[in-house]
Amino acid sequence: MCRALTCEILKTIGFTTVHAAEDAEHALRTYDEHPEIRLVMTDLHMDGMDGLELANALRSRPTYPSPVVFVLSGDQQDQATSQRCHEAGVAAYICKPVHRANLQQMVQQWLPPDP
């Protein structure tokens, strides 16, 4: 539900192409196939590779520039998570539920306008 809602919100704020992945491995494959992706939104807690591990894996890809990564979680951000997000290069930590205005503000803050 959250993935579908987040995709719909992204479309309403101007994203014309939105890819949804089932897990981190699928996200990496999708990014490898579409290196033009500028924003990756990932759940913090996932089976296998978590959202911060995904952020690190994306940063290690040879594509330049790396996508902006937003991490979503139902948990409140604590100091340890904040530090891990910083180390992984995460641009924003968004608490669920995702709200359109909040997401739009984050996108405007972190993504340059299309050329």
Image (tube, helix red, strand yellow):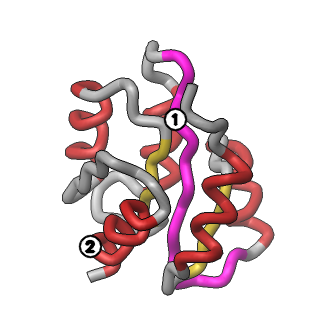
Identify the residue at image location x=67%, y=50%. Answer: 91
- Placement of 28 over or under 98, stated as above or below: above
What amino acid is at disc 2? Ala
Tell me: 102 left or right of 14. Answer: right
Q: Does label 2 or label 1 sit earlier along the sequence?
A: 2
Q: Is residue 79 left or right of residue 103?
A: right
| Viewer-proximal residue among 105 and 41 | 105
Q: Amino acid at mark 1?
A: Pro
Instruction: Give residue 74's position: percent from left, percent from top.
Output: 51, 83
| Image spot of residue 107 (x, y percent) | 61, 55
Q: Report the residue at 56% width, 21% height from top.
A: 65
The answer to whether residue 53 is above or below residue 36 is: below
Number of numbered discs on residues = 2
- Image quarter where the C terminus lies is top right
Q: Secondary structure at mark 2?
A: helix
Task: Identify the residue shown where x is 33% and y is 77%.
Answer: 5
Q: Position of residue 58 (x, y in %)?
A: 45, 33
Q: Secondary structure at mark 1?
A: loop
Q: Is residue 69 magenta?
A: yes
Q: Which x, y percent locates residue 22? A: 20, 59
Residue 58 - label:
none
Q: Is residue 113 left or right of residue 32?
A: right
Marker disc for residue 67: 1
Kindly identify the residue that appears in the image at 54 percent across and 61 percent down: 71
The stretch of residues the image draws in magenta is 64-77
Which residue is disc 2 drawn over?
4
Q: CA distance from mark 2 to mark 1?
A: 20 Å
- Can you say which quadrant of the picture contains the N terminus? bottom left
Q: Is residue 84 above or below residue 73?
A: above
Compared with 45, 36 (above or below) is above
